[in-house]
Image: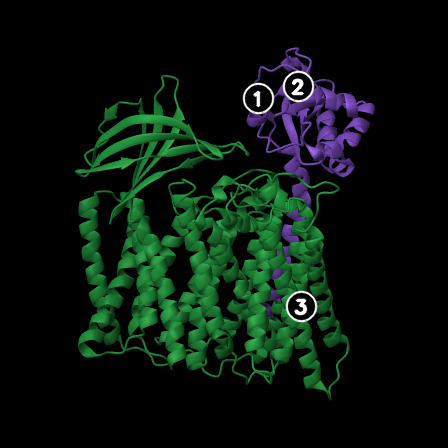
Chain colours: A purple, B green
Amino acid sequence: MNQSLRILIILLPIFILVFFTKILLVDEDLKLSSFEAKNFPAFELDDLNGRSVQSESLNGIKLLNVWASWCITCLVEHPFLTKLSKNNVEIIGLNYKDSKSKANSWLEKHGNPYLFSIYDPRGDLAFDLGVTGAPETYLLIDSKVVGHIQGEMNQQKWETIFMPLIQQATQKK
Amino acid sequence: MIGEISHLLSLSAVLLLSLVLIFNLFFSFNQSHSNQLILSMRLFNQACWLVFISFGIYIYLAISDDFSIAYIANHSNSQLPIFYKVTSIWSAHEGSMFLWIVFLIAWSFLFINALDKNHPLKKPTLLMLSLIILGFLLFLLITSNPFERILPFGAIEGADINPVLQDPALAIHPPMLYLGYVGFVISFSFITAYLFHGDFKLDWEQDIKNWSLVAWIFLTIGIALGSWWAYYELGWGGYWFWDPVENVALMPWLAATAFMHSLFASSKSDVLKTWTMFLGILIFALSLFGAFIVRSGIIDSVHSFANDPERGLYLLSFSGSITLLALSVFAYRLPSLKSSKLVVSGSKESFLSMNNILMITSIFSIFLGVTYPLIIESINGDKVSIGPPYYNTIFAPLILIAAVFIMISVDALWQRSMSLRSLFITMAIPTFLSFVSIYLIWAFASVFSLLAYIGIFSGLLIIFSYINRIINNFFNKKYINKGSAVAHLGLGLLFFAVSMNSIFSYEKNLNLAPGQSISVNESVQEFYFKDIRVFSASNHDVISAEVSLLHDGKEISLNPQKRKYATRGQITSESAIHASFLKDTYLTIGDQLENSSWTFSLKINYFIKWIWFSAALMVLGIFLTIFKKKAS
């Protein structure tokens, strides 16, 4: 009795440990596959050139980058976004609480990695998206928000957060 | 720069603690034993101070809005009052882990320095504590570094603290809970040290008794505050949801409660020592399990922090290793751990040990409830959820049995068995009174729920037994243990209040346009929705409804609100609560419907404040016990 109790005291925790380790290792894939995509909120806004933005333009695999001319970290991630756009990643800008003239001159000065930038001076769309500040980047697949990064976008976040999501989406197709 | 200093101080602490371990594990100078201990103690104390100062600097960084530090930038904001700038530190994973570790170190520091310098267990306890602290400091610095900077340019403004966290109850709920959780590192390390040391003639109970009682107080207050916060601030309308994270806090609490009882038994009459040791190890193991559940993101819950498998694996492997270490020594020493006396059946300690078994059963049931969905999901991918019905069904009978044992043990004596006659006398009055009360409640409520009535009956049994005892004490000068009486009255009241709440409370969902009034039922004769106003406050927009109620002949005006916070776009609900002796009138405003009317949820919660009052009584009881010990 005593002997088996001693064995039980050690074996039971080991069993629990192994079980949770297994769950943890499986959990990662599970979390990604069960990520519930949210529909992109409806909006009526123009881009920085004054053309109204069509919701069809959000189809396909797109990045939506929230930026502003007053945002310093946006400048930090700017070279990386430019690199992405050169590698044919389609990026849409969401110009956030900014003025048209400042935003356009910022793009002229630093270069424009965006297909176009939605002009959101009051932050309405940003509000509906749940933006907490610039910069933030959303991954859209066919007008659905499937991924979200707060703060600076960089190589590491791109590879670890967005790439797996994109691969998963393309595999499904 | 200041941030780097703070970071460096924590890193140095890691170095010093590693030195303590290396020094003691690899170089054992037998002849200069005491010098070795003195040196280790100095290193350890300095490591503690380094972390304290590091945390102090971190608080300064939060107050001074250093948004170049990523964690502060993400969780604080220059507009916040200083109080919330400080509390924002524990509003997410990295900072709260830092706080957790600071508390771990504080307990260890106080305990090891309070221990007599010639105490034979001082060195092994010190080593155990150093090992645990080192493991968690490394966890903090490697996987969840709160000092990380945003480079090259910091943020200009912080992202703001989550608005539901801007509440005084939240500001103290996590620190209290953490103080409780980590306080049991003392019993864990000391018992493990005792088992390693192997001299079983030593008395060890007295050295950790008061420490464990204080930790129990913190844990109880922490849990009670959390439930208070959910009810008053989060607008959940309830006090306990059997949420996985609540459950992982309840498990160490149950273990700690059992441990406390067992500790009294083993220090009074030399029995149940093995039990006490096992429970002492189990509490901290369960606390670590809780930390793992919350911080690995393995379970979706309101409390979970961002999930990160790397963190989960580290926490699991480290917590698992130290728990296994302790349990292995325990299992190894088990044959030589014989209590000097056998438990006499019918004695006080026999009922205590029965209740130990009940508490272990309930811990196991909760553990099963928490892990069952994970087990099922890993077997066939189905998602199941285990809710209140499971826990209520499991707990009702356990509570009843526990109440009966508590009732009998009130008059039982240490080490002596009880005669049938005195057993009958003890049980007769409380049982009779409880049956009468149950009948009255049933006649009055005209609702029948077996589980709830079991709960009420159990609560009343305990309450009446102790009242009976108090009256006996008053008239016959019979001995009474004040601390125990107050704490158990609290427990009885808790069972009573929770069950009464579940029978009498009800909820009504209403739809009204401004200016309309309706009659809800006999008790709430009039519900008048006067007006709705929309306005902006400093960092949020407010929708505020003005409602006046005619409730049991009294007019009550209530202002439930909804707030939309600008920086995060988060919507919170501010319930309006009117409290009276027996019940709370709890009103929450919902959404606007298309015909311009609004939805309201009106809850009448009976006996809900009594729940927190009962927790306060239990805490008071333990306080009395601690001070009685001091006085004697």
Q: Amino acid at mark 3?
A: Ala
Which of discs 3 and 2 lies nearer the camera? The answer is: 2
Residue B611, above or below B283: above
Host chain of mark 3:
B
Q: Is residue B259 among what the camera can see?
A: no
Q: Amino acid at mark 1?
A: Pro
Which of discs 1 and 3 lies nearer the camera? The answer is: 3
User: Looking at the image, which residue sits at the far bottom?
Assistant: B31
Which label is found at residue A41?
Answer: 1
Q: Secondary structure at mark 2?
A: helix
Alpha carbon distance from label 1 to label 2: 23 Å
Q: Are marks 1 and 3 in contact (CB under 8 Å)?
A: no
Q: Residue at x 67, y 60 (%)?
A: B137
Do marks 3 and 2 share a subunit? no
Percent x, y of residue B630: 41, 78
Res. B594 image quadrant: top left
Q: Secondary structure at mark 3?
A: helix
Residue B383, above or below B123: above
Residue at the disc numbered 2? A100
Percent x, y of residue B44: 66, 72
